[in-house]
Image (spheres, helix red, strand yellow):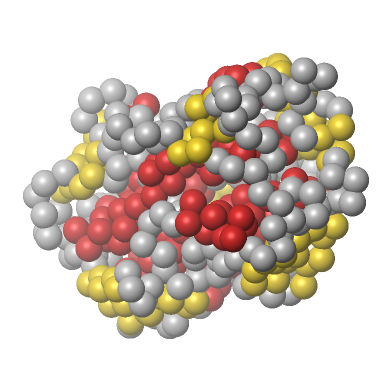
Amino acid sequence: MQDPLPMNPVGPFDLEVRPPGSKSLVHRAAVIAALADGETVLTGVDPSEDVVITLGALHKLGAKVEFNPQTREARIQGAGGALPGGVTTEPIDLGASGTSYRLITAVACLAQGTHILDGTPRMRQRPMRALVDALRELGADIEYVDKTGFPPLKVTGGTLQGGKVKMRDLVSSQFLSALLLIAPGCPEGIALTFEGNTPSMPYVRMTVKVMEHFRVKPAAKESARSGRMRLTIEPGATYYGRPYDIEPDASGASYFLGAGAVVPGARITIPGLGSESVQGDAQFADLLGRMGAHVEQRWDRTTVAAPASGKLDAVDVDLNGMPDMAQTLAVLAMFADGDTTLRNIGHLRVKETDRLDAIANEVTRLGGEAFLMGDDLTITPPGKRGFACSAESPVPIHTYDDHRMAMAFALAGLRVPGVQIEDPSCVAKSYPKFFDDLALLSADPAA
């Protein structure tokens, strides 16, 4: 077990930081590339655990994948709609990557042979029924190996035909993305109708944008009255391999944008991530503006500076579309003037950990207050007694094997002494060099 990593408060800084490439984009582009006609070269691919898991799983399903972590280039030879399979008879371990598991489950339905898809103990607790039911309706042969509704799964490929399918009130938008991505491999295409509450819908729009880059454009029809949307990929649609450059990860950038907002006198710029981003989390900068930070966003970069007062404003915000920002905003809320409420985030209970309970626990341990009411979380900053940590009495932050807990709560340590991050290596899931990049803030000559 690693020793806790002590965080040290920093002074003013003015820096540019470029986080690794978006793993959400890599997941989607890699799946498309494996199913496409021709070769695709992905550039800007960071070797995080989740990315390596997805690329490795595609290889085990028969895709021709070459990945160079040094050049951050992945070269994928497309199989033209279906993968040959047969590379391994061992279970495919998808670790703790929920995105990998959901997308690869759908891809495996297009691969020849039978494959067992497994993961960590936590992955075996994450729901899969809605996706499995939809895939079965489209002709897939899928069995639950153990507990109904949850991994591991046994998938026998070659039976998926496509057609019409309806879904509603999903716990994850990844179910929708998984179906959309494999639609060109289905002889009958897919006509997907969904309604009700689906979190993280900007990620579905991201999926559509990546599909369009590879020459498949779903037809969309939306009813404002019923809240129903239909996305159709007609039979015969084909992906075509082509170069694709991965822009910086907006979720990874959020921690540095948050640092620029919370440290008095700070200013941070993220090159390569701006108003033209296909990532929904790029809108996080707008939330920082609502909290009083100075925000400038051009098409190709985003800059955030702390308010002159050094005090952020409390906000009341619906995070259903940006759930990965909840932990970051919860930490920033401890430095705000008043109570901050994060709404519509109940689905965080089925992430890498129960993120609602985890946030509430660690905010409380630092001296703040956290109140859970249904799917909403309200954060009250520490009172007159201040934070519960100090240089003499440090507080180790439990990270629950969750990369976002580690990265978000590290921000508190940029302002107050005594914050320590337990199991800091858990950031390897999405951002292996996070703490190296964070150290740049204290190395800036302006600090």
Q: Residue at x 69, y 58 (%)?
A: 447
Q: Looking at the figure, which quarter contains the N terminus?
A: top left
Side (left or right) of 20 relative to 193:
left
**In terms of depth relative to the viewer, which is nearer, 265 or 18?**
265
The answer to whether residue 210 is above or below residue 411 is below
Where's residue 46, x and y in %? 41, 64
Q: Residue at x 47, y 77 (%)?
A: 244
Where's residue 118, x and y in %? 25, 39
Side (left or right) of 384 relative to 272:
right
Residue 141 appears in the picture as rendered:
no
Q: Residue at x 62, y 57 (%)?
A: 441
Please, which residue is most extreme toward the left here? Answer: 89
Q: Residue at x 43, y 34 (%)?
A: 4
Please, which residue is most extreme toward the right here? Answer: 309
Side (left or right) of 273 relative to 139:
right
Residue 401 appears in the picture as rendered:
yes
Answer with the quarter of the image where residue 64 lies.
bottom left
**In terms of depth relative to the viewer, which is nearer, 365 or 130?**
365
